[in-house]
Amino acid sequence: MNNNSQDQTALHTSLQEKVRKGFGAGWPICLGYFPIGLALGVLAQQAQIPVWAVGMMSILVFAGSAQFICVAMLAGGASVTSIILTTFVVNLRHALMSSALAVHLQGVNRRFLSFFAYGITDESFAVNMTRFNNGDWSKWSALSVNHLANAVWIVSTVTGTVIGQFIPQGAFGIDYALTAMFICLLVYQLQGIIFVATACIAAAIAVGWYLFIPGDSYIVGASMSAATIGFFIKRRTRDGHASS
């Protein structure tokens, strides 16, 4: 065996090891994604969304919270414009996560970055950021985390949609599952008085907007308004602590 063949073999072995490390770090994410994906699929099926549409949504969007919101808005008869704007606002945090990871991916070609960015979620970001900061973590390991989670999410949502055909409407508390999911997501975000205040402001604006302004724009309006108000409250509080 010549030196070139030996180098290629070593490179292939090294790449396999990096991918295995990524899978090892990503499997706990998959354990969490599978039941949530099943629940989303069941809810989507009961909202009369076909299997192919759920599959395409998971492939093209790959954002659990945004997909739950989309299903709820479709079931409520929301307009396409409202759904797109709401999804955009909900997923703005991905720009911040991508910026943080970019520090560890300098010099990587754009094709790889595009493929990598597609798979970023809250969970994969947390795993990869921790591993990058601890050292001994490669772009291939990080990519493996992203796309293992992606594959499991697609399979689980499609499976849930198929299973949902055999579950009667309202059985096992399915009608409440979406509301429960959003309550759970909200509770995990309440990490201080400012977050609680922002949540209360969002609820008040949403109710007022819904009662006095026709249409379904209250979701987008309440989200953007409360987020803006919360940002200024947090900045003013921080500036007040700094001056004192």
Image: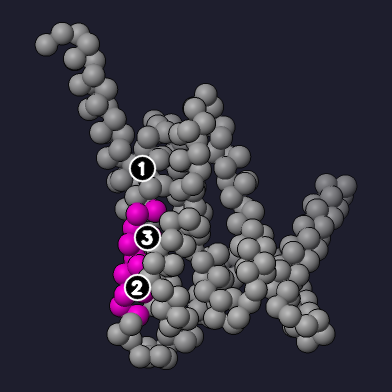
Residues at marks 2 and 3, CA–CA distance in whole angstroms: 10 Å
Q: Disc 1 to disc 3, how far (Cα)?
A: 15 Å
Q: Residue 102, relative to residue 4: is it above or below?
A: below
What percent of the width, then of the height, locates residue 202?
Answer: 73, 73
Frontmost residue, 194 versus 109:
109
Q: Secondary structure at mark 1?
A: helix
The tag earlier along the polypeptide, 2 or 1, is: 1
The quarter of the image holding the N terminus is top left
Local crowd size for mark 3, using a 10 Å CA cut-off: few (<14), some (14–19), many (≥20) = many
* Mark 3, residue position: 154
Q: Earlier in the sequence, mark 2 or mark 3?
A: 3
The reply to whether dot 2 and dot 1 touch (C-beta < 8 Å) is: no
Left or right: 66 as drawn, with respect to 237: left
Instruction: Assign a secondary structure to mark 3.
Output: helix
Question: Which residue is at the front of the view, 52 or 211?
Answer: 52
Residue occupying image coordinates x 70% and y 78%: 216
| Main secondary structure along the magenta-highlighted residues | helix
Rendered residue at 51%/43% (across/down): 117
Does the CB distance between marks 2 and 3 fall below 8 Å?
Answer: no
Camera-nearest label, 2 or 1: 2
Q: Position of residue 39 (x, y in %)?
A: 40, 74
Corner quadrant of residue 75: bottom right
- Judged from this view, the residue extending furthest toward the left is 1
Residue 92 drawn above or below residue 74: above
Label 2: which secondary element:
helix
Instruction: Pick out the residue farthest to the top.
Output: 2
Residue 155 among those drawn in magenta:
yes
Query: Residue 239 location, x and y as percent?
Result: 84, 50
Query: Is mark 1 in CB contact (under 8 Å) with mark 3?
Result: no
Q: Which residue is mark 1?
A: 144
Q: Which residues are magenta?
A: 150-164
